[in-house]
Amino acid sequence: MTNKMVCDLETGVCGEASDNDLETIVLNQPQKKITLYYVTDPICSHCWALEPVLRKFEEQFGHYFELHTVMGGLLENWDGFADVANGIGSPSDVAGHWREVGEYSRMPIDGTLWLDNPVQSSYTPSRVFKMVQQKDEHLARTFLRRAREAVFAFNQNIGDEQVLINIVNQIGLAGEQVVRESGLSDGHEYLNQDLTFARSLGVRGFPTVIMVNEENKGVKIVGSRPLEYYIKGLEQILGGTESVKGKTPPLLTNLLEKEGLLFAKEIEVLYDLEPTEVNTFIQEALPSNDYELREILGETYIFKESY
């Protein structure tokens, strides 16, 4: 199956993206340096599928840009929602699609929550993300990662306040306070600012990556794409005069210390491994008392003992 995928902003449905989704754009706001805007949503399945490639791109080429995550608003609510052409008219219709994305991407997705405990709105976790982001950009991205692990791999409803409180507590903030504040006027305003900004960038689907240089020009890449697309876009925004140079990936010990949990697919992509090489690589790279290795939905994952 192709991995040129995109989630439509207006319908909330994901599908195949065309090659025309790599385009050059011009923004009205001047930039002091290269900024990478990652427009996404906590329940975007193709954003979850993109995680291994986006991590590799940032780890190896992040010295060229500053990444800023923007919430785009995939699902406000289910009232009146219907996409007859794609067979989605209710939450239960999403389950099969999610499982399909998980199978082709090998980033585990359970999806059965759509049958018995569906997310009613992605705006709820998006507002929590924005509240965390006001405090710390790095923690906000950690929150987003934990929320995605929860909803995709571990089948938890991240529209539920208690689930969100637990996640915020795990990243070291006061969960009840942050989640409560996210439902107040400031939380709504912060999210609305992101939604407005995403529209100003011409974003219609997720994931969308936009790189902007200090000459006020940008490259927009829509959908879950191979690494080469992002490297090509970076070279284009830098002027295309020479190839960009990637850094050596971090040691697995350092990466696991930072991330806490990694799936086999992420390790394969970052370290250019074959699936059959992952377990040996892990055993050689990590002290046995530093991690646990488990399996979920047919895929291996590792996590820190303290995770």
Image (tube, rainbow, N blue to C red):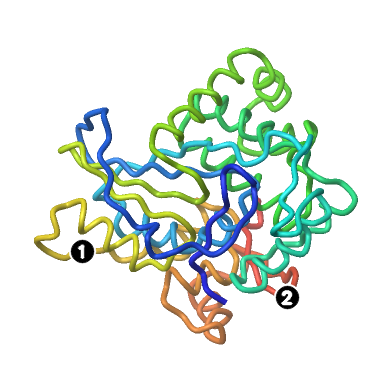
Density class for disc 1 (Cα within 10 Å; few <14, some 14-19, many ≥20) is: few
* Residue at which label 1 appears: 245
Q: CA distance from mark 2 to mark 1?
A: 35 Å
The quarter of the picture where residue 290 lies is bottom right
Q: Is residue 280 above or below residue 206?
A: below
Query: Where does the image place residue 19, in percent across and percent down from the top left?
Result: 39, 65
The quarter of the picture where residue 182 lies is top right
In the foreground, 227 or 27: 27
At 57% from the left edge and 53% from the top edge, which residue is drawn? Answer: 7
At 55% from the left edge and 82% from the top edge, which residue is drawn? Answer: 275
In the foreground, 216 or 62: 216
Q: Amino acid at mark 2?
A: Gly
Density class for disc 2 (Cα within 10 Å; few <14, some 14-19, many ≥20) is: few
In the foreground, 86 or 192: 86
Query: Where does the image place residue 204, in percent across and percent down from the top left?
Result: 49, 44
Q: Amino acid at mark 1?
A: Lys
Q: Residue furthest front?
A: 85
In the foreground, 185 or 16: 16
Q: Circle 1 sits in a helix, a strand or a loop, which is it?
A: loop
Query: Where does the image place residue 128, in percent across and percent down from the top left?
Result: 63, 29
Is residue 267 toward the left or the right of residue 96 in the image?
left
Q: Which quadrant: the N terminus?
A: bottom right
Q: Residue furthest top?
A: 185
* Residue at which label 2 appears: 298
Say which mark, if any, is on residue 104.
none
Among the two numbered marks 2 and 1 on one chain, the one whose residue lies closer to the N terminus: 1
Q: Is residue 142 above or below residue 245?
A: above
Query: Where does the image place residue 149, in percent across and percent down from the top left?
Result: 66, 53
Q: Residue furthest bottom?
A: 276
At 34% from the left edge and 60% from the top edge, which residue is drawn? Answer: 230
Q: Circle 2 sits in a helix, a strand or a loop, which is it?
A: loop
